[in-house]
Amino acid sequence: MSNVPVAVVTGSNKGIGFAIVRALCKQFPGDVYLTARDASRGQEAVAKLQEEGLHQLFHPLDIDDLQSIRALRDFLKEKYGGLNVLVNNAGIAFKVKDTTPFAVQAEVTLKTNFFATRNVCTELLPLVKPYGRVVNVSSMVSISALGGCSKELQQKFRSDTITEDELAELMTKFVQDTKNSVHEKEGWPNTAYGVSKIGVTVLSRIQARMLNEKRKGDHILLNACCPGWVRTDMAGPKATKSPDEGAETPVYLALLPSDADGPHGQFVSDKTVRTW
């Protein structure tokens, strides 16, 4: 078993994830794994970084596939005895002009951005070693979407006692409400991506609370963050930040020094804690 520290970035063959891997290769003192659903795209991305003189490794990962997540879990356990840095970056978004019915967009978006990210956390968080760092890539859209929720929903999403199961029930209810064409009546905003990222931000708050309760002495720091509006396939060419600029906040949180006691359980944008 290797004593080398290890970092994993989900969905990292392009865009922000790729830029996070690049930055970690330069700054993280250990092995960095680029992951992708498509092995050939993943290997291409690895080759690109090797041309820059960077050394990183590849492991296939489709976060929508529980077996794929568990294969990565078993590999990390066997080879490294755990994990030091986890960046949950993988996610999807429909384009604004996409004509796919909203209920379908809701189901597909929540499946990956919330439920699959939650599955990765369920399988990999127990592997995180003392002084580990976990970064869940959310979005400022989660704050604007929260503002578009009914007062009752806002209260639930801001609660300091909401459980993971209660959050999952709310995310499931949103999908169901879109299928029944009652989501606005039920107090939801008209954004599937926004609701999925509310889920990621609230999940992070819950996970940080659980770490405080169960692993207080391990000094693990876990946060949600917004990379900003970044020029990627997802956000388009008009966005204000380059992928490398978008990677700055996630990388900052992934590399918080071992003597740091925060941020933890926060929503961070431009390296600054934002009010949720």
Image (cartoon, grey):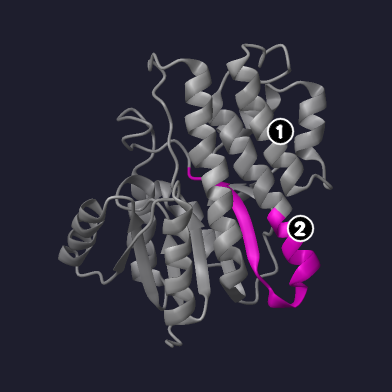
**Which amino acid, mark 2?**
Arg
74 or 19, nearer to the observer? 74
Q: Is residue 228 above or below residue 40?
A: above
Above or below, 86 against 230 in this view is below
Gap in angstroms between the C-alphas marked 2 and 1: 19 Å
Which mark, residue 77? none
Q: Position of residue 1 (x, y in %)?
A: 43, 88
Q: Secondary structure at mark 2?
A: helix
Depth check, front residue: 67 or 48: 67
- Using residue 223 as the reference point, say whether residue 47 is left or right of it: left
- What residue did someone put label 2 on? 209
Residue appearing at x 46%, y 50% in the figure: 89
Magenta stretch bounds: 207-227
Specify whether residue 138 is in view: no
Q: Can you say whether 271 is above or below 31 in the image?
A: above
Total numbered labels placed on residues in the image:
2
